[in-house]
Image (spheres, rainbow, N blue to C red):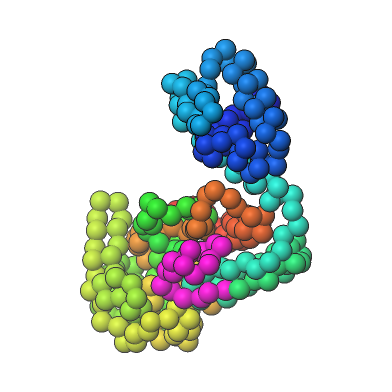
């Protein structure tokens, strides 16, 4: 099979260059070796693949069929070989990562020691921001995105789930009480997050019951850090992604309310510019992010 694939690769190159001589130069072989390789392939298949004249080379019907299939097989084999080599090579160069600012600080920065220990020759560069960037144009190797829907054109790996959690500080709840139903939000101070559609209307579902609750925020912000900080300071109730406050909930700095009601959910994804070749450093970084997401319990919906 290996010899057959090598023969197909030579045959494909002959057709694409239109010459045994040019194919030999590109492949680093002698013209006689290229000619003998194609002849052995014809003998193996029991069919003529090329019409040979002193002026040109043209594929027979069988040659056209082999070229159509063989070219794809050769390309796939080349990608596979490159991936295997990439897995074995010592990672180096730069790893450019695009991700939301808060996610970077809370969940990507903590994995850097383990990543740099495994890849000591790699320089990590973060592009932080809420707005997605064009991966190819920005030279991004991997992006972390939290979204309910992603473009079909993207190459993605789903890492986990981000739920929207309504939470407040224990001090606020002690002072103002804990709502048991979304309709009780009218009597509470609200901290709003302007980038999301639920900045001024919070949707909830419980079984067959759905409630869209209009809210009038006492404070509005366009950054996740300020949203979280305002909630921690006891200013009111805030609707925040679970990945942003998982540590605050665990240590009791924030308390989830309306837990029986389901708020919007989104996926946590690793996004790549291409699935043709993934360098070892990219794969290692994605694996470390996936491990952190699992450790935080963010891998399943409620």
- Observer-nearest residue: 120 or 264? 120
196 lies above or below 14: below
- Observer-nearest residue: 31 or 118? 31
Residue range (magenta): 126-143
Q: Quadrant location of residue 257?
A: bottom left
Residue 223 at least partly seen: yes
User: As drawn, is 17 to the left or to the right of 150?
Assistant: right
Name the quarter where the N terminus is drawn. Answer: top right
**Is residue 109 a member of the stretch shown in magenta?**
no
Q: Residue at x 47, y 26 (%)?
A: 59
User: As drawn, is 42 to the left or to the right of 61?
Assistant: right
Residue 9 at least partly seen: no
Q: Residue at x 43, y 74 (%)?
A: 130
Q: Residue at x 74, y 53 (%)?
A: 89
Q: Residue at x 59, y 44 (%)?
A: 79
Q: Position of residue 221 (x, y in %)?
A: 37, 84
| Residue sticking out furthest to the top | 46
Name the quarter where the C terminus is drawn. Answer: bottom left
221 lies above or below 124: below
> How many numbered marks have been drawn onto this rendered protein structure?
0
Q: Position of residue 92 (x, y in %)?
A: 71, 63
Q: Position of residue 195 (x, y in %)?
A: 34, 76
38 lies above or below 242: above
**Is residue 128 a member of the stretch shown in magenta?**
yes
Q: Position of residue 44 (x, y in %)?
A: 62, 16
């Amino acid at each position: 099979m290996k010899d057959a694939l090598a023969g197909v690769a030579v045959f494909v190159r002959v057709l694409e260059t239109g010459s045994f001589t040019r194919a030999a130069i590109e492949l680093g072989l002698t013209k006689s070796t290229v000619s003998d390789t194609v002849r052995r392939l014809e003998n193996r298949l029991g069919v003529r693949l090329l019409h040979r004249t002193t002026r040109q080379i043209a594929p027979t019907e069988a040659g056209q069929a082999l070229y159509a299939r063989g070219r794809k097989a050769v390309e796939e084999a080349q990608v596979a070989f490159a991936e295997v080599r990439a897995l074995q090579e010592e990672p180096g160069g730069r790893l450019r990562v695009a991700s939301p600012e808060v996610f970077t600080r809370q969940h990507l920065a903590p994995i850097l020691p383990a990543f740099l220990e495994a890849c000591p020759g790699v320089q990590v560069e973060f592009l932080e921001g809420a707005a997605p960037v064009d991966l190819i144009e920005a030279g991004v190797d991997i992006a972390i995105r939290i979204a309910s829907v992603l473009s079909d054109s993207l190459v993605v790996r789903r890492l986990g789930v981000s739920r929207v959690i309504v939470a407040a500080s224990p001090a606020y709840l002690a002072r103002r009480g804990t709502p048991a139903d979304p309709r009780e939000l009218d009597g509470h101070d609200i901290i709003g997050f302007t980038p999301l559609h639920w900045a001024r209307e919070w949707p909830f579902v419980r079984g067959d019951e759905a409630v869209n609750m209009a809210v009038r925020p006492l404070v509005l912000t366009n950054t996740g850090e300020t949203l979280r900080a305002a909630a921690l300071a006891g200013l009111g109730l805030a609707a925040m992604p679970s990945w942003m406050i998982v540590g605050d909930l665990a240590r009791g700095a924030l308390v989830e309310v309306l837990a029986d009601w389901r708020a919007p959910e989104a996926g946590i994804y690793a996004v790549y510019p291409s699935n043709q070749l993934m360098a070892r450093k990219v794969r290692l970084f994605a694996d470390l992010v996936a491990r952190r997401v699992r450790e935080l319990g963010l891998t399943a919906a409620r």
